[in-house]
Image: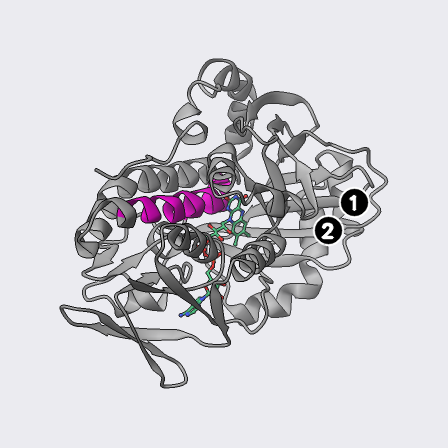
Amino acid sequence: MKVIIAGAGIAGPVAAIALAKTGISVEIIETRDAAEGDEGLFLGLASNGHRVLEGLELDACVRGQPHIRTPQIAFFGARGNRLGNVTSGYCDSDVPITLMRRSLHEALSAEAERRGISIRRGHTVTDYQQGTSGVNVRCSDGQVLRADLLIGADGIRSNVRAAMPGQRLQPDYTGLLNLGGVVPHSGLRSTEGEMRMVWGSRAFFGYAVREDGEAWWFANIGAAKEPSKNELKSAQGDWGTQLTALFDDDLPLITDLIRNTPEIHAYPIHDLPHVPRWQDGRVLLIGDAAHATSPSSGQGASLALEDAAFLAVCLRDITDPVAALARFETERRPRAERIVAEGRRRGAYKAPRTRLQMHLRDTLMPIVFRVFVTDRSLSWIYDYQVPEHAA
Ligand SMILES: Cc1cc2nc3c(=O)[nH]c(=O)nc-3n(C[C@H](O)[C@H](O)[C@H](O)COP(=O)(O)OP(=O)(O)OC[C@H]3O[C@@H](n4cnc5c(N)ncnc54)[C@H](O)[C@@H]3O)c2cc1C
């Protein structure tokens, strides 16, 4: 069987590696010329994602990248008062980590190529046509490639999704912007073991500091109207001023970090709560193409890894490939959509609209952490194990 995968982000190379292990021939088509991902700064890999990496013996290559160990997520009020902690789960190889999105893309693609999987770079899948015995995959240079199956792992603005009949095209804007940067010499002590999140008076801030003092931070701010790419570009020089004004009343290290950041990146946050169909016969969406979740869930990468592993299980255990793709959607949809909804819910608390809302939040949060947000209540996310069999 020959499978073409559109996209060498996270889901694409890991699905390719998992499929190759079951003896399936795979080729990846990737838009970008080099293995790079200039969007997204850093991301947290939770224990459910690590479990997939361990199963495919990919954990060493990922942990070989610069990272910060972040088994705990610690929450603080605006003035630095600790409100509570949650874990990002437990995994066998080591603890969950945070790493640059770009390093993760690079490491996974390099490992796929090292294992003999071809990545055709600089080509974009534009659409497809299928018959009873296979699918013709059209690329931007006019080439048409023939395969038994096409997997759309081409991210939140998936062309494969757009080519499916009756499909949802645009993701939702969540009303939040994500900004962030890196401060090479922050002068702060290492936070190793913790990703720290501060509910500021007007916006949300997260940071982690490596042993060598390099700090990675992000901020989420409310913006009712989604800025265009041009608006984001022209605001580039002003982000520092805007952010320091928003965090002026809060923990002073926040404005220090912002002022010492050489380059601040800004992106609107989108998600896809419900994509009507993930499958069209011999074509399937996985990862962000099917169920992009806001970074507030901390689960986009981990869900993409789970998808990759379960796709291989389905194609190994079910002889009819169309039935295998249908089984994939049935199993994965409820969990993925629940996590996307959870990401939305968490994002809603990040930008308080009134002083009263902020006061209520800071008063109630310690109770919420003690009673409701516990390892047990989060177990459905972090302790999840991809089924070993598809039947
Ligand atoms: C700012 C930000 C912060 C995040 N924080 C977290 C976090 O803390 N934890 C977490 O788990 N997740 C986080 N995420 C989400 C995570 O990055 C995504 O969920 C994850 O990358 C999804 O993987 P994917 O392989 O489905 O898509 P992507 O990683 O987006 O990869 C898609 C790939 O397809 C390529 N491509 C696109 N279109 C085509 C085409 N038509 N043909 C060929 N190639 C194509 C792209 O170039 C890209 O390489 C964050 C994302 C952002 C943007």
In this view, the residue in front, 11 or 317, is 317
Say if 170 sits above or below 144 in the image: above
Measured as percent of width and height from the top left, residue 198 is found at 63, 33
- State the residue lying farthest toward the left: 132
- Residue sitting at x 27%, y 50%: 315
Using the rendered image of the protein, determine whether residue 177 is visible from the camera's viewpoint: yes
Give the CA distance from mark 1 to mark 2: 7 Å
- State the residue lying farthest toward the front: 23
Say if 362 sits above or below 300 in the image: above
Measured as percent of width and height from the top left, residue 87 is found at 55, 25
Residue type beneath disc 2: Val
Location of the C terminus by quadrant is top left
Say if 27 sits above or below 311 in the image: below
Question: 38 left or right of 323?
Answer: right
- State the residue lying farthest toward the bottom: 142
* Helix, strand or loop under label 1: loop
* Helix, strand or loop under label 2: strand
- Residue sitting at x 28%, y 43%: 333
Say if 44 sits above or below 77 in the image: below
Q: Residues within 10 Å of mark 2 (few under 14, many from 20)?
A: many
Residue type beneath disc 1: Glu
Main secondary-structure element of the magenta-colored stretch: helix
Q: Residues within 10 Å of mark 1 (few under 14, many from 20)?
A: some
In this view, the residue in front, 1 or 314, is 1
The label on residue 182 is: 2
Measured as percent of width and height from the top left, residue 109 is found at 54, 59
Is residue 299 magenta-colored? Answer: yes
Q: Which residue is mark 1?
A: 214
In the rendered structure, which segment of residues is drawn in magenta? 293-314
